[in-house]
Amino acid sequence: MNASSDPLHQMASDSSSVQTATNSSSIPEAIVDPWKTQFGADALFPLANEGKGGELAQAIESLKIPDLRVISAKGWRALYSRDQADVPDLLRDVLFKSMPGVVVQPFSIDAVTKVLRFASSRKLPIIVRGAGSSPFGGSMPVKGGIVMDMNAMDRVLDFDAAKGLVKVQAGMRWSDLDWFLEKYGLMLQSSPSSRFSTVGGWVATGGIGIGSVSGGHLSRWVSELEVVTSDGQVRILHPSDKMFRSLFGSEGRLAVIVSVTLKARPKPKAPFPALVFFDDQAKALRYASFLAQAKTTPLDLTYYSPGKFEAFNRILGRSHFPAKHAVMWCYESKDAVPSCTAVPSGAKRAETYLASLIWNERFFPMKFRKLGPGLMGSEVMVPKEHLTEVVSQADIVSRHHGLSPLMEVHFMPGGDGLLLTYYTTDQAKMMRYTIDSFRGLLISSALMEAGAKPYSLGVWNNMFSDQAEEGDLVEAKAELDPAGIMNRGKYPRLKGRLGGLPAAMFSPGVLGSALRLVNRAGMVSTPAIKMVATAKAFDRQGDDMLLRTADECSMCGACVGVCPAYLLTKDERVTARGKLLAARQFVLDDDISKEHAHRIFLCMRCKACEQVCQSKLHLIEAYDEIEKRLEKKHGKDDEEIKRFVALAEQSPAYDALVERGLVLGAPAKSVQGGK
């Protein structure tokens, strides 16, 4: 990091070239960049690292790769040892080497290629990370290695409004891209429910979500993928290329996705949602399947279980919704609603305001974690011919194990669906938390036997790899990852700290068979599982405000992309998620360095994080508390904080956040609420 660089001068220089975009076929990068500027690794707000951090970090530093930040500080690297999935400590610490040896942030394709060539020469694992929102450990290292954080590559590279084509770097977040396209009356056909995940991340982890019933799989709306293979070769892939489809759902096992070209569509001016309640699950699913196969399909189509509405009522503090099965559909306008949506006999359509409430909450699926605090579950793809049986089985198996399932089905054209089955847990109760993680596997196993297929594998679902529809993955792996380093340790079988032991334990033959046996034992096995789950030997004692807030955090990363401190530093330690993880570490182990503590102090109190927080946490109160404790131990550099605030408040990125209504506290912008 070049501490003598002048970010303010850089911003002024870049901002002067910004103009109003037109519908031209190709426009300069500076015009289409939502933040109107892009820092290189040496032009960010200067951050001190904690030494060189070991031989691997020093080896990469010695290459002097331009546009590359090398992260070696222990506390900083620890943020990359997990993703949204919180694998129980009893398993993670014993079986896996989840702490990366080093983290790199490339700011250019050239930096990506050089890191990959270095890793290939040493046979080092490369774990590509986007927003870190995988619920099953997709971006969690299992054999250490190099984590490649793609979030610094987050620009719009090209845009053709007339053709509806937009080319973005892989680190661009869906929410930012939506905001950019909305100014031109455009939208993406479909998007993940985790709206703050990255474009490259969703390509790599699935591609089915909100809007899939009308648009189909994400791959139908991607016209080009730019990737870098493990030997450092840049490849451009189109839908006609054999390797193209293999990259969707590949979970970082094939190549580094560096840019994606998507096809946008006109944005409906007044989308019209409706919510229809049913007493019977099978009738609700038949109604939804009928709409999914109709001549005119809705923009979006989702089934919700009664448990989902019970949880909504708990979050809202009032009984707004009946505890019944429901189908949510949304068409482009009220006039576009076809007659086939007529409410069947015995069903009841909810009032419009309730439908609008659920529709507006579609991008916040993890908010129920606060009720645990903790959320686990299962995600499977279900063919339409097995849908009723599989959804019914999810409910039955969940209740056999004492769980109250929160279920939803996102429909595809023709009636196939993505079934999400979640349930609350409690991270403070270690045995319950560990057993609850296995309960999710028991549910998934039962659903596979009923005809479902795994949607994503990661670490936690690896024992279902023999049932995944991997397509041409073997051939694609040989061609795109000749060095065998991409997400190494998760393919073809899971490996970790103890060599082949995780592979044996998590294999379809061992754990897969055990899960089927427990499910077939049915109620006979349930009391024994409950007895282990209620053991209190490893429970965390006490009720610390910081630990409670960290447990309630959904770890979705929504706060990261709207944090002005992060946009200026690209350092996740300054974000809400990073602070809460650090707070947990500090409270449990008192292990936060002075350098790490001083990053946590870089905060605007703008409340953008609270605006997008799925769990609706009182984050400012948590910041006040962690800062008070850290200042007592490490002191505080008031001058550094003043310099940071002055710089941040003049940044175009901050202006963009104010324009979007995400900032509630911006003293320099005459917005009240800041501290």
Image: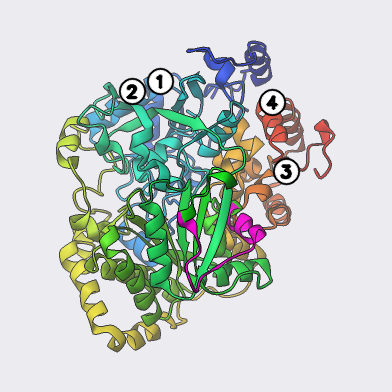
Q: Residues within 10 Å of mark 2 (few under 14, many from 20)?
A: many
Q: Secondary structure at mark 1?
A: loop
**Residue 592 in sight in this render:** no
Q: Amino acid at mark 2?
A: Lys
Q: Is residue 439 left or right of residue 70?
A: left
Q: Which labelled disc corresponds to residue 651?
A: 4
Residue 531 rendering spot, x and y as whole percentages? 39, 86
Inspect the image, locate mark 1, and give the three-letter code of the amino acid beneath it: Ile
Residue occupying image coordinates x 47% and y 24%:
164
Give the labeled residue for mark 3: 636
Q: Earlier in the sequence, mark 1 or mark 3?
A: 1
Q: Which mark is residue 65?
A: 1
Query: Distance between the Cα atoms at labels 3 and 2?
Result: 38 Å
Instruction: Rate crowding at label 3 as few (under 14), some (14 to 19) or many (20 or more) other CA atoms within 10 Å.
Output: some
Amino acid carrying label 3: it is Lys
Identify the image quadrant of the C terminus.
top right
- For the residues bearing labels 1 and 2, Cβ distance under 8 angstroms: yes
Q: Which element carries disc 3, helix, strand or loop?
A: loop
Nearer the observer, disc 3 or disc 2?
Answer: 2
Which residue is found at the position 24% from the left and 38% from the top? 246
